[in-house]
Image (cartoon, rainbow, N blue to C red):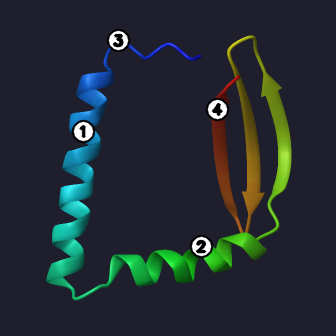
Amino acid sequence: MRKRPDNHDNLREEFADVLNYLMELANRFDVNLAEVYFEKHKINQTRQWKIVYTVITKKRRCNKMYEMGIDIICCWQL
């Protein structure tokens, strides 16, 4: 089982703040978040990301990916 980061409680609060801000923006601009999430999820499932390189350490793996002129770096703990 993964160890929680020391700042886990702070992260929870920050995520809540971000979610609250997103929900307020969506309400202000009359955007149905559930609807647009599933629409975008469908699009993302068909995307073909080119992995430029992968770095694996003892604790995490990172992929640098590229699509349509955008570089994305994704990391996750092992």
Assign a secondary structure to mark 1.
Answer: helix
Decide: is 41 above or below 76.
below
Image disc number at residue 14: 1
> Measuring 29% from the left and 85% from the top, which residue is drawn there?
31
User: Spatial distance from mark 1 to mark 3, Cα to Cα?
Assistant: 14 Å
Three-letter code for the amino acid on which mark 1 is drawn:
Glu
Residue 76: give its label.
4
The quadrant holding residue 42 is bottom right
Front residue of 51/39: it is 39
Residue 13's spot in the image, x, y percent? 21, 36
Left or right: 72 with respect to 49? left
Query: Separation of disc 2 and disc 4 at Cα?
Result: 20 Å
Which comes sooner in the sequence, label 1 or label 3? Answer: 3
Answer left or right for 30 relative to 59: left
Q: Residues within 10 Å of mark 1 (few under 14, many from 20)?
A: few
Residue type (three-letter) at the residue carrying disc 3 = Asp
Residue at point 71% right, 22% down? 78
Mark closest to the chain's N terminus, 2 or 4: 2
Which numbered tag is attached to residue 6?
A: 3
